[in-house]
Amino acid sequence: QIGLAISLLAPNNELRKKLVPTATSDSVEEIIEAGHNYFKKTGRRVTFEYVLMDGVNDSREIANELAELLRGNGSHVNLIPINPTAGDFERPSKSRVFEFKRILSGAGVNCTIRIEKGTEISAACGQLRTDIVG
């Protein structure tokens, strides 16, 4: 059987547009509705992949907003603390990640924190890159 995983970086269109400037066609609500329709048709839950970025999309307010959107729709949220890179985003603290999870779980949203592998050798998700030495 095939599962459906959807990348969801933000619970609202304003933040989503800042994080994904090319995301113009579907609103957050339409994406979540499509996932819920998939669940209703197939009986298989949808996984929303949510990359947590320190100070960007990991606040209590955003967690509550996300919980409100996903409560009761049969989905699962996979919380993924962003892996360290040379980019602009940083990983939130473990306490912030666990607080985000606590808020979602407390609202009845099924969620887990992804176990990371490969971070120590810069080979985790989003880290594979070429370093120029010289």
Image (tube, grey):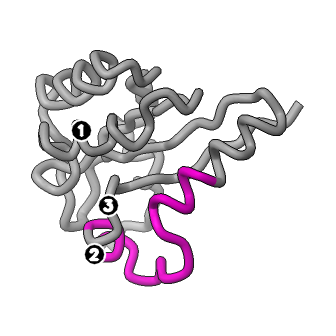
**Residue type of the residue flagged with mark 3:** Asn
Classify mark 3: residues with Cα within 10 Å, few (<14), some (14-19) or many (20+). some
Q: Which mark is residue 63?
A: 1
User: Nearer the N terminus, badge 3 or badge 2?
Assistant: 3
Where does label 3 land, which residue? Answer: 12
Q: Which residue is mark 2?
A: 18
At 13% across and 37% down in the image, what residue appears? Answer: 60
Q: Are marks 1 and 2 in contact (CB under 8 Å)?
A: no
Task: Where is residue 78? Give x, y as percent.
Answer: 46, 32
Q: Which residues are magenta?
A: 15-33
- Locate residue 2, reporting x and y percent: 84, 37
Horizontally, is 4 left or right of 107 in the view? right
User: In terms of image quadrants, where is residue 50?
Assistant: top left
Q: CA distance from mark 1 to mark 2?
A: 18 Å
Magenta region includes residue 26: yes
Badge 3 element: loop
The mark closer to the camera, 1 or 2, is: 1
Q: Residue 42, image x and y in percent?
A: 83, 34
Q: Are marks 3 and 2 in contact (CB under 8 Å)?
A: no
Q: Residue at x 14, y 43 (%)?
A: 61
